[in-house]
Image (tube, rainbow, N blue to C red):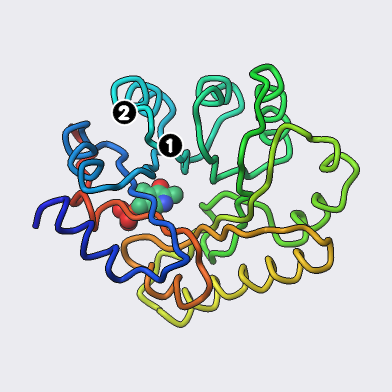
Amino acid sequence: MSVKENLIQIKNALSSNVTLVAVSKTKPNEMIMEAYEAGQRDFGENYVQELVDKQQQLPKDIQWHFIGHLQSNKVKLIVPFVYLIHGVDSVKLLQEINKQAQKNNKVINCLLQLFIAREETKFGFSFEECANFLRSELFSQLKNVKILGFMAMASNTDDEGQIRKEFRSLKEFSDKTSSILQLNFSVLSYGMSNDYKIAMEEGSTMIRIGSSIFGARNYTT
Ligand SMILES: *Cc1c(COP(=O)(O)O)cnc(C)c1O
């Protein structure tokens, strides 16, 4: 199937309150343009240099999502144009985003990344660290970042029950934290090609889909 056909099929399966981010990492501009011409405007990338190059070459009304692990020293390269930074996994990184945003006279939309998986390898705050941070004086001082909600990745497993449980734990955390701290977190970014249906059933409002739209990635080229 073509990129356009894949996109239409996924869009038809989406709940009405869910935003689709088309994850185009490693994929050429021609494929992104196919999706663009089919009406897609939200695209996600994991690598800073690749994102910067694509942003320069592609239409300016694309909303670029940075979904990878962001190093503090690269923040300044994406702040001028990025629409939403998903994987904010440390206070230090958020402070750097705030600093660069201030220099650019902007407020940058961010999601805090939570660690919900069983694996050791995934980045993110624990629920407790995150709640403590959101209550802190420091958080209230960061005026040039706007936390829209949370992002997470489930364990890489075939066990649907486990994946469901992990997504549900984040949804519960978000609801509880929003009500206790009276903050309005409206974005929950979880669900990828393999688990987005479960993610939507468990309250996701933003799914990040790569291979089911653009085909498998080939990292050797
Ligand atoms: C690559 C990636 C995706 C998309 O993964 P697919 O399995 O290809 O849909 C989603 N989120 C993050 C953080 C990614 O790195």
The quarter of the rendered structure image containing the N terminus is bottom left
Question: Where residue 134 sits in the image (x, y, percent)?
Answer: 80, 52
At horizontal 29% and vertical 21% (from top left) the residue drawn is 57
Of the numbered discs 2 and 1, the one sitting upstream in the chain is 2
* Mark drawn on residue 59: 2
Decide: is 76 above or below 21: above
**Seen from this angle, which residue lies furthest bottom?**
161
Count of marks placed on residues: 2
Amino acid type of the residue tagged 1 in the rendering: Trp
Q: Residue 110: which quarter of the image?
A: top right
At horizontal 34% and vertical 46% (from top left) the residue drawn is 23
Decide: is 89 above or below 168: above
Decide: is 67 above or below 179: above
Q: Which residue is mark 1?
A: 64
Left or right: residue 135 compared with residue 95: right
Is the Cβ of the residue at disc 2 closer than 8 Å to that at disc 1?
no
Question: Where residue 116 sits in the image (x, y, percent)?
Answer: 58, 64
Question: Where residue 153 sits in the image (x, y, percent)?
Answer: 49, 59
**Seen from this angle, which residue lies furthest top?**
103
At horizontal 51% and vertical 61% (from top left) the residue drawn is 119
Near mark 2 (Cα within 10 A), the count class, few <14, some 14-19 or many ≥20, is few
Left or right: residue 39 compared with residue 204: left
* Mark drawn on residue 44: none
Near mark 1 (Cα within 10 A), the count class, few <14, some 14-19 or many ≥20, is many
Asked whether mark 2 lies closer than 8 Å to ligand 1, one says no
Decide: is 203 above or below 57: below
Amino acid type of the residue tagged 2 in the rendering: Pro
